[in-house]
Every structure is written in structure tokens, then in C-alpha cells.
Amino acid sequence: MKRIVVTAPQLTDIVARELDGCEIIGGDTPMETGDHAMTREELAEQIVEADALLSSLSDPLDADMLARATKLEVIGQCAAGFNNIDVDAARDRGIVVTTTPGVLHETTADLAFGLMLMVTRRLGEAERYVRAKQPWHYDHTFMLGMGLQGATLGIIGLGQIGEAMARRAAAFGMDVVYTARHDKDASAIDATNPSTAPTRRVELDELLRTSDVVSVHCPLTEQTRHIIDAGALAAMKSTAYLVNTARGACVDEKALVTALRNGEIAGAGLDVYENEPDIEPELYDMDNVVLLPHIGSAARRTREKMTELAARNIAAMLGGKDALTPVG
Ligand code: GLV
């Protein structure tokens, strides 16, 4: 019987259904009921005899960890990102790595768009104000924020999620510029709204200088680590906002705190952090910052589809077939 190690709380009914006939270890203690992902030590113990891992985005699947695996055939990462996995080390050991593209980008773009609205229209701040029972009445000059219509959105990384964010932005009347290694097909973005400017690929420095909102959607790699650093923040308009739903380490979080403190940018909407779940303490006290707990794809149906795809990748590989969505 094949042994599947599920490294973190999972939708266990779906795992059991998709991997019927396998031995399933772990995955059945959701955070709400008091437990969380396997520790490094637990994973190190479990990986030795695993035929497959159904993994989560913060599992430390580095070369040392993978060297402990004696039977591992496939890692079914239940996420779009895979920066926690040493893919070269896996390949060297004949382990196939799979992820879950194509099922979470619309949901994650919804969240990114929500963050953009929250931070530019001061929704978190306004809601805290009301809950604090502060005196208020309708006032023409009260809680003024930035409107999205006519503003420019700069998307760093026009992959599936970036493109879905761009379509939403165009529908709200924003012009879109983006960075990517090559020109991308922007026809679906431009078709959304004939009155916005044609979507253009630009260099990062132009994007930073001209955007009213900069939204990060690139994978975390050695090239994109701290792509938003002190210099990038200084290049942004002082009226511009940063949104990050990609990976925390794409942004130098300490530099972000300094830039916000000095008014170099207008605000930030963050769903991800450099050292999750820790957050730079000063950010908690900044009213022009929205902080979410890494919930980009956390819609029930989306999470179901992610689990299904991760499990089906494992089932395919263990059944001698090709993986559905391998990395690379
Ligand atoms: C979430 O952050 C993911 O990579 O799916």
C-alpha cells in the first residue's frame, strides 16, 4: 500500500476520496481545533518512508530534507507557489514536483483586488473607526481616499494571478502596465474595458515611477527576492500604494516600514510577510496598512479544487501515469 504523508491540515474527505486505497498519514488536525502543519522534525521523520507528500507552502522541502526520502516519488504541493521546495534537488533524486495552477488565480485576484480597494479607500481604517465608536457624521471632507478610475496599476509578474488582477482593474477603469520577461497576451485585459489605455509591458523602473498602485504577483526566486527594496519604494510616487499577495520576501519588509514611516508611499495592503506568521511590529500600528493572514486562495470551492488537483497529481504518478501539472 502506498504511503501518502499529508503535511498540514487538509480537506481530508477529498484526500481520502482521491487517494482511496492508499495509507494516509496526517492532515486531519485543522488550526481551528488546535494543531497546525508538521514541524521540521515531524516531517523529517515522516518523509523517510513516504511514497508521496501532499505538501503545503511552508514545508521546508530543502535538499537536506529531500535527502532523507528513500521512496519518495512525487510531491503534490497544494499551492501555486513552490519556493519552499528545492526543485533541483528533487529532480536529482527522481522526485516529481507538482503544483496547483489554473484553479486558484481568480480567487487570489479577488483578494488582491479587495486589498487594493481596502487600502486605497481606507476601508480597514474606516471600519476600525466605527467599531471604536468614534464620533462621525456624513462630511464631504472625511476619510478621503484614492479612487481607482483613471489610476494606473503596475503589475509585477503577469502570470495567471497577475492577469486576473489586471482584468479586474481594467473593469474598474484602471490603466495597466506590467513587468514580465516577455510580452504577454493582454487581449483579455484590453477587451474588458475599451476606454482604458492599452496594457503595456514596461521596465520595472518605469512601472515604479508611474503606477498609482504596485501589485506584486511574481513567484519568489533569487531574482525576485526583495524586488521591492528601499530603492524601489523610493522610486514609487509618494501617493502610490503597494499590494502584495505573492510571497512576503518579494518585499523587504523592514524597508517597507521605513518607507511608510517616512511617507515615501501612501500605504500598503499585505496578505503575505517575510517571516510568516511574524509581522514587522510597526506595521500593526499603521492605519494606512491593511494586514491579512495569507488567505489569498481561501475560498472553500477553490481550496477543494486545489486539494483535488494535488491529490490527482499524486494518484497519477503513483499509478504510473504522467503528472497533470508538474513544475517545469
Ligand atoms: C498561495 O500562496 C499559493 O501559492 O497557492
Image (cartoon, rainbow, N blue to C red):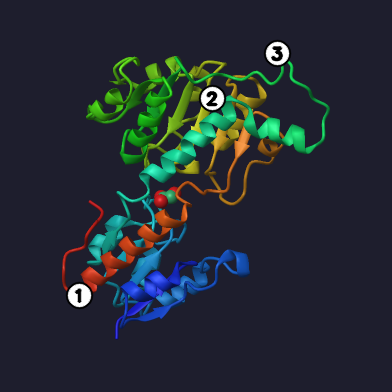
Q: Can residue 12 be seen in the rendering of this structure? A: yes
**Position in image of residue 119 (x %, y %):** 58, 29
SS of the residue under disc 2: strand
Residue assigned mark 3: 140
SS of the residue under disc 1: loop
Q: Amino acid at mark 3?
A: His
Among all residues in the image, which is located at the extreme left? 321
Mark 3 or mark 2, which is nearer to you? 3
Q: Viewed as shown, does residue 38 lie left or right of 207?
A: right
Instruction: Judge whether 148 appears above or below 181 on screen.
Output: above
Q: Amino acid at mark 2?
A: Tyr
Precedes in sequence: disc 3 or disc 2: 3
Question: Which circle marks residue 241 in the picture?
Answer: 2
The one of 244 and 251 positioned closer to us in this rendering: 244
SS of the residue under disc 3: loop
Q: Viewed as shown, does residue 29 lie left or right of 160?
A: right
Instruction: Judge whether 128 appears above or below 46 on screen.
Output: above
**Position in image of residue 201 (x %, y %):** 29, 22
At x 34%, y 25%, the residue is 178
Residue assigned mark 1: 319
Q: Gap in Å between the C-alphas at discs 2 and 1?
A: 48 Å
**Position in image of residue 168 (x %, y %):** 40, 31
Precedes in sequence: disc 2 or disc 1: 2
Q: Gap in Å between the C-alphas at discs 3 and 1?
A: 65 Å
Residue 126, by quadrant, is: top right
At x 43%, y 24%, the residue is 172
Q: Residues within 10 Å of mark 2 (few under 14, many from 20)?
A: many
Q: Amino acid at mark 1?
A: Gly
Q: Viewed as shown, does residue 87 lie left or right of 323?
A: right
